[in-house]
Amino acid sequence: MSEKQEARNDVVRSYKDAPTRTITAGGVTFAYRELGPRTGTPVVFITHLAAVLDNWDPRVVDGIAAKHRVITFDNRGVGAATGSTPRTIQAMAKDAVTFIRALGLEHVDIHGFSMGGMIAQVIAQTDPHLVRKLILSGTGPAGGEGIRNVTVLSHLDTVRALFTLQDPKRFLFFTRTAGGRRAGKEFLARLKERTVDRDRAISPISYSNQLKAIHRWGLEQPHDLSVIRQPVLVANGDHDRMVPTKNSADLARRLPNSELVIYPDAGHGGIFQFHDQFVAAALEFLER
């Protein structure tokens, strides 16, 4: 987008065209992108293990940005952001709040996917006045069943992907049924739609630190989720191997103002496999 366009406040409507910007706060230079209308409550996307800006499904981003300002960002030490990646979810949440406030935002909606959903839960507890609504997808609560196994699963499926010359997300995010395989192929193709100004891949040390943070989250004592009073939309596939689906049901049960959506024949990336349905549900939830 040119300086003249920015001066006219033209709305960026496509994630693949959203310029990558930076902002410095708390000793960290965060990389971020934004698109959609400039009015209303922004929706901040917090992403998953090993992900950078280019790992968001453009159908999900564009779908929600059709009605809302969407902001995606690299947390500390990830992609184009500076600093060292924290080894706890709580420290990642603190960094995310620093970024949000650096943008001058006082009230946001948050969509946290997988590890991002863990970060979002902490933000809602530590900075409740910052959060209007939450969307928690493919994620689970502290101490949730099977979360401590994410490291082992990630390593195993990475090796399996290397031997079969495939992307690990095909195994980690999608079922091995015909529908799941097709959805995985289509999802990975969408991630390549942006061809310029792509983000840097995560470094091995940052990936390792994120795995440590998720492992610790899985070993924590359960949090009192009754303190999260905001409306929450919980979504997942019915066969999530990374963060077992029963964690989504547990979240919905323990959050006092929540609703649950489970997609059939879908894994960890259920919201990407059923992106049309998820976007429709998210828009209805946010606009309610």
Image: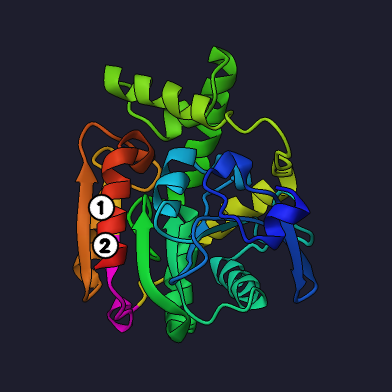
Residue 170 percent coordinates (x, y): 45, 26
Q: Could you give the CA–CA distance between mark 1 and mark 2, rounded to whole angstroms?
A: 6 Å
Which scheme is used to colour this image of the protein? Answer: rainbow
Which mark, by number, is residue 121? Answer: none
Q: Is residue 184 above or below residue 75?
A: above
The answer to whether 71 appears left or right of 149 in the picture is right
Q: Residue at x 31, y 64 (%)?
A: 286
Classify mark 1: helix, strand or loop: helix
**Residue 54 part of the magenta-drawn span:** no
The one nearer the camera, 242 or 202, is 202
Q: Amino acid at mark 2?
A: Phe
Q: Circle 2 sits on which residue?
A: 285
Q: Is residue 237 above or below residue 284?
A: above
Q: Residue at x 36, y 25 (%)?
A: 183
Q: Quadrant of the C terminus?
A: bottom left
Query: Residue 35 is drawn in which quadrant?
Result: bottom right
The one nearer the camera, 72 or 157, is 72
Number of numbered markers: 2
Q: Amino acid at mark 1?
A: Ala
Q: Which residues are magenta?
A: 224-233
Q: Residue at x 70, y 38 (%)?
A: 198
Q: Is residue 61 above or below residue 9?
A: above
Q: Is residue 110 above or below residue 248?
A: below
The answer to whether 243 appears left or right of 27 in the picture is left
Binning the other alpha carbons within 10 Å of mark 1 as few (below 14), some (14 to 19) or many (20 upward) gives some
Q: Circle 1 sits on which residue?
A: 281
